[in-house]
Every structure is written in structure tokens, then in C-alpha cells.
Amino acid sequence: MAGPEYTDIELPLIEQLKAQGWTHIEGSLDDPAVTGRNDFAHVIQECVLRERLTRINHRDGRPWLDDERLSQAVGALTRIPAAGLLEANERATGMLLDGIAVEGLPDWDGGRNQTIHYINWETPANNRFTVINQFKVKCPPGHDTGNGHIIPDLVLLVNGIPLVVVECKGRTVPEGMSEAIDQLRRYANRRKADGEVTDNEGAPALFQTNQLCIATNFD
């Protein structure tokens, strides 16, 4: 049975997003396929991303990306070479804003490299907007000191890419806002980075493409 945290905070936000064209998916703690993933360790809806990449990247009004180029684009976003989360986030943000260059076609623009865009910034309606509650993510090896997974209350994805993580606390939770902020920091392993805990924790991969973290309570 849903508690006040869901009915008072999560559900109104979900309904507001649905009214603005977002699709809502009820998360599953047992089957990652419900949320468009093959494994709880994955944070990107790869099938959705591939479909949207094909749809928003055209040559003369027609799709042109083959499987090899699609895999290159997906891999660039899921395997980011970086020394830490902040660097990975900077690199991911650059790709989200500007796209990535891939090999072009011999009969197009002199064979020059072409840019694959992850998000259609010019026509937002061409993107897919999804909100998922109870978005379970498996912690990587060495980060599973607790339950072995994290479950943010809400995750907002654009074209299958998680951009916003929301943590909600009910009105009866003492210091609810502080607790929500601390939980987000735990999810992203920021407490270890800031020297507050000694062990790695959370699932930092969820935050590589993150653009906004929201901590909220009823007030």
C-alpha cells in the first residue's frame, strides 16, 4: 500500500509531468525489463535511446544511422573514460549538448564526419520523456555495502537517458529535507568523495548523465 510519501509528494509530481506529456512507468524491484533495461546494473534505456537516435538524426529527412554507429553513440555515453564522477558528468554533459562525431557516408558531404545528437534541442516534441518511480539500480562491486542496490523515488529520463533524480520525504520525517539530500549524496558516492565515510557506496553511474538532483518534502 502506498504511503503518504507517495500520495502526497511523488504522485502529484508524476501527475503534473504526465499533464505535460511525460510517460509514467511504475518501477519494478524484480524485473529490470519493466523499466526498459536488461539488467538493474544498467542506468540507460538502451532500446529507447537507439530508437530515438534513429528518429532524431536524419539525412535529408531520412534516418541514416546503422547499427555500428548506433552502438558507437550508446557506448560513448555508457563507457565514459574519466577519473571520477565529476569528470564523467562533465564529459557526458558535453555529449548531451553537442553530440558526438562519427564517420560519415562516402556520398554525403564529401565523406566528412557527421554529428549524432542525443537530444533534439530544436524540437523538444521529438524527444521521449519518461518518469519512473522506484527506479532500482544495482550497486557496482565494492559499492554494495548496504542492500546492494539503490532505489531513488523518481528518475526522469529523456530519450532513455537519466537526467533528473528526485528523492522525496514525507511531512512526518524529522529533518526530512536534510535526509533526502544525504540520501542523494549517498546514491552518488559523494559522502566517500568528501571524506565523510570510509567505504564506497551507491551507484555513481546513475549520476554520470545527471543534470539535476531534487530533494523535496511535503512543505
Image: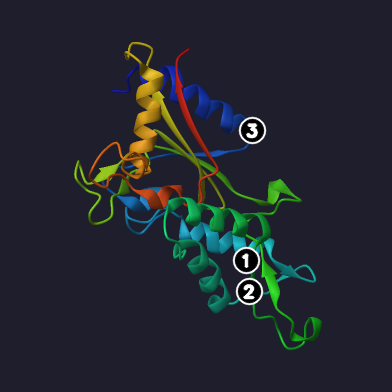
Q: Residue at x 52, y 57 (%)?
A: 48
In this rendering, position of residue 217 left or right of residue 104 = left
Q: Earlier in the sequence, mark 1 or mark 2?
A: 1
Relative image position of residue 9 (x, y in whole percent): 45, 20
Residue type beneath disc 1: Thr
Question: In the displayed structure, would residue 65 be above or below residue 157?
Answer: below
Q: What's the residue at 28%, 55% (across, down)?
A: 140
User: In this figure, which residue is indicated by the disc labeled 2?
Assistant: 65
The answer to whether mark 1 and mark 2 are in CB contact below 8 A is: yes
Please tell me the numbered disc located at residue 213. none
Q: Which residue is mark 1?
A: 54
* Along the viewing direction, whichever of 146 and 25 lies nearer the viewer: 146
**Contact check, label 2 and label 3, Cβ < 8 Å:** no
Q: Callout 2: few (<14), some (14-19), or many (20+) C-alpha neighbours within 10 Å?
A: many
Identify the residue position indicated by label 3 in the image.
20
- CA gap between label 1 and label 2 equals 6 Å
Quadrant in the rendering for residue 105? bottom right
Q: Is residue 195 in sight in this rendering?
A: yes
* SS type, badge 2: loop
Q: Quadrant of residue 188?
A: top left
Q: CA distance from mark 1 to mark 3?
A: 24 Å
Q: Can residue 152 be seen here?
A: no
Residue farthest to the front?
Answer: 195
